[in-house]
Amino acid sequence: MFRTPDRPSDVASRQPQTLRPRITRGPFSGIVTVLVVTGLVVAGLWSLTANRQVPVLVATADLPAYQEVEMKQLTLDTRVASDAGDYATVPVEGRITLKAIKKGEPLLDSDLSPSVRGLIRGQLMVIGLDVSRGDVLGGGLRSGDPIRVLLVRRDREPIEIRAVVLSASPASSVGTAWSLVVAMSGQDARRHAGTLASGDLLILKDPKAAIVTP
């Protein structure tokens, strides 16, 4: 008998087939992939934000506390962006340092008072007053608050001086005596230096006074 040669396709069909394993994705595999990708993106964005440089004002010399700031005392530099965003910004004229600032140190907004030039003209003078807790409204006065200082004189009309609070803090552990640091006109401060030092005064908050804030 004559046998017809097998065709290549028939031979291949009789050869044992190699079974390939089927990969079955679990129900959470897609979610895990999304989370991993999202985490990488967030980490990349955070890295960029953490290293972002921003312009800041830097002192070109040591600045003492309670000194009016001028732009000629500052220069522009860059620092890593602060999460709080609390670097001081222009304008700074008319603002007063609330602490000593070292050369090369960036200015923070909390280092400076609000501008006092909306209330006080001419030469500024910073003075400290010893007052009672009641005079500072139970500790309610804050930096930048406009006040009226009434100088009480015997058998004479009181004298009123406008001023701006720079700081108010207890001068003793019991908190009955307070130290109040204010900015006022240099002319008023010199003219009434004796009465201011005597402590015969009243402090009134002046909510209607015009204070220019940056």
Image (spheres, rainbow, N blue to C red):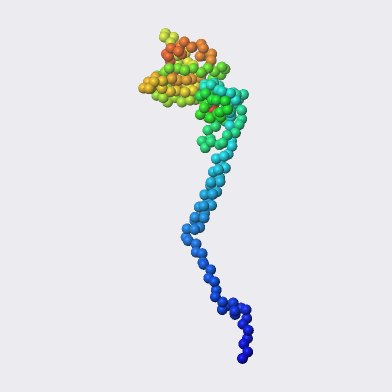
Report the quarter where the C terminus lies.
Answer: top right
Q: Is 182 situated above or below 86?
A: above
Answer whether residue 89 is visible to the viewer in this image: yes
Q: Residue furthest front?
A: 1
Q: Quadrant of residue 58?
A: top right
> Which of the two residues, 57 or 166, is positioned nearer the viewer here?
57
The location of residue 113, given as percent across then percent down, is 52, 25
Total numbered labels placed on residues in the image: 0
> Which of the two residues, 200 or 82, is positioned nearer the viewer here?
82
The location of residue 160, given as percent across then percent down, is 47, 15
Q: Is 76 situated above or below 158?
A: below
Q: Is 190 situated above or below 111?
A: above
Q: Residue furthest left?
A: 174
Determine the residue positioned at 53% across, 46% down.
43
Report the quarter where the N terminus lies.
Answer: bottom right
The location of residue 115, given as percent across then percent down, is 54, 25
Determine the residue positioned at 57% across, 17% down.
122
Q: Residue furthest bottom?
A: 1
Answer whether residue 146 is visible to the viewer in this image: no
Q: Quadrant of residue 95?
A: top right
Determine the residue positioned at 52% across, 21% down.
66
Q: Quadrant of residue 187?
A: top right
Lateral position of residue 33 relative to residue 2, left or right: left
The location of residue 202, given as percent across then percent down, is 43, 17
Determine the residue positioned at 49% across, 25% down.
144
